[in-house]
């Protein structure tokens, strides 16, 4: 009897020990904080991606910058390398598209916003011709009256991520080597990845860029898009770095106001790397951003001063969080030019609304996707898999 009790206690102890080992070896995907040291190499840039196709410059609007690339997992069917084009009858035709080549250039901050900005020139002429059919005015009118009829048939099987590049809202490009590589990396992890361009300040100040990425997300949720790329509308997340992190966060915290959300299509997970989250006078205080970056923020906001800038609050994710906001993964370096407090305060606000947050502080000055060493890349993929699978 006593021997049996000792055996039972030993088994219980073994189970507890195994659980402890597992919890220590698993990267964070829940509501927790972690401080890490990043390696010197942007991991997605160091890999070769066999079987990952990139459908370049797919139009989601009529403006020259309203284009996106689609990075497809290796198991994609051959017809998913085509561009979905809604027809008057509501069914999707397809326009063949060339696979886009990598564009060179990564800026010193590592956010992929170096020279070479502008849309990729490698897409087939047929994609440009398809733009008129795929473009819309932001209301979804271009989708065709028959979209509702094919909605049920358009339910796909794969998770997807809308990815938004950085560049201080004023430059940068989806096709630079760093962002193209991150797009391919996410595709290699099984996510259909939509790598989006958007209108830039100061030519098109806030809310133009936010309107564009919202339009792109609405395009992802169209039945023709879901069907073409085999995307499950219940498994869509967003990813952004730097200014793209701000836009990704803004998409998430205002998602409950969108038409897609009302129809049941919503963001399920958010990755925000170094995204500015408070663009108000708070960022001008002693621990705020530099004077040079303040000027960039004001150009984006379309304001001359912070004291007279209603757009500052409207463009700050900090002020729009609700209990309906999707779970967040936030990565931010301890000594980079976007102050750490921006992400810390934003994470605290999310938690006050019971939104799960994985917050990873990276020691050093690596900004945006420059944080993506091997371990950080796998943390991001693990988080997305947890919430989109």
Image (cartoon, helix red, strand yellow):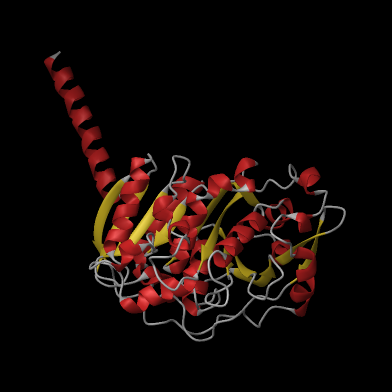
Give me the residue at 54% from left, 49% from top.
255
Give the image quarter of residue 8.
top left
In-front residue for pair 312/53? 312
Residue that sits furthest to the left in the current view: 2
Residue 236 placement (x, y as % from top left): 56, 51
Residue 36 placement (x, y as % from top left): 25, 61
Relative to 355, is 159 on the left or the right?
right
Relative to 264, is 32 on the left or the right?
left
Task: Count all numbered tags in the image, as a single digit.
Answer: 0
Give the image quarter of residue 203.
bottom right
Give me the residue at 60% from left, 48% from top.
258
- Residue 323 in view in this figure: yes
Relative to 162, is 64 on the left or the right?
right
Residue that sits furthest to the front in the current view: 308
Give the answer, above or below, for where 342 lies relative to 267.
below
Q: Quadrant of the N terminus?
A: top left
Relative to 369, is 39 on the left or the right?
left
Residue 288 placement (x, y as % from top left): 28, 67
- Residue 187 in view in this figure: no
Give me the residue at 62% from left, 61% from top.
216
In-front residue for pair 380/135? 135
Residue 134 placement (x, y as % from top left): 75, 64
Residue that sits furthest to the right in the current view: 89
In-front residue for pair 311/123? 311
Give the answer, above or below, for where 285 lies relative to 177.
above
């Amino acid at each position: 009897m006593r021997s049996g009790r000792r055996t039972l206690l030993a088994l219980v102890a073994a189970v507890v020990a195994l659980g402890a080992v597992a919890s220590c070896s698993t990267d964070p995907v829940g509501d927790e904080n972690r401080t890490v040291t990043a390696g010197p190499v942007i991991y997605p840039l160091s890999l070769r991606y066999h079987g990952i196709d990139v459908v370049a410059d797919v139009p989601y609007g009529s403006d020259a910058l309203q284009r996106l690339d689609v990075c497809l997992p290796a198991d994609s069917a051959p017809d998913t390398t085509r561009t979905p084009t809604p027809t008057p009858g509501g069914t999707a035709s397809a326009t063949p598209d060339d696979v886009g080549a990598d564009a060179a250039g990564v800026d010193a901050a590592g956010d992929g916003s170096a020279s070479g900005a502008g849309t990729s020139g490698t897409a087939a002429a047929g994609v440009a011709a398809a733009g008129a059919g795929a473009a819309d005015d932001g209301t979804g009118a271009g989708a065709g009256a028959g979209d509702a009829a094919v909605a049920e048939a358009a339910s796909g099987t794969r998770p997807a991520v809308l990815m938004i590049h950085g560049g201080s809202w004023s430059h940068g490009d989806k096709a630079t080597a760093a962002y193209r590589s991150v797009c391919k990396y996410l595709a290699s992890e099984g996510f259909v990845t939509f790598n989006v361009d958007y209108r830039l300040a100061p030519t098109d100040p806030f809310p133009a860029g936010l309107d564009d990425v919202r339009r792109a997300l609405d395009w992802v949720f169209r039945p023709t898009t879901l069907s073409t790329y085999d995307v499950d509308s219940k498994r869509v997340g967003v990813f952004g770095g730097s200014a793209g992190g701000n836009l990704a966060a803004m998409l998430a915290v205002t998602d409950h106001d969108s038409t897609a959300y009302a129809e049941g299509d919503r963001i399920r997970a958010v990755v925000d790397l170094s995204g500015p989250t408070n663009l108000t006078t708070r960022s001008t205080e002693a621990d705020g951003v530099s004077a040079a970056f303040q000027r960039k923020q004001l150009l984006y906001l379309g304001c001359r001063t912070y004291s007279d800038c209603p757009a500052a609050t409207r463009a700050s994710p900090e002020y729009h969080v609700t209990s309906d906001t999707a779970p967040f993964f936030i990565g931010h370096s301890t000594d980079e030019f976007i102050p750490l407090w921006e992400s810390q305060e934003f994470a605290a606000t999310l938690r006050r609304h019971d939104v799960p947050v994985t917050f990873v502080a990276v020691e050093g000055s690596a900004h945006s996707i420059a944080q993506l060493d091997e371990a950080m890349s796998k943390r991001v993929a693990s988080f997305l898999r947890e919430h989109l699978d």
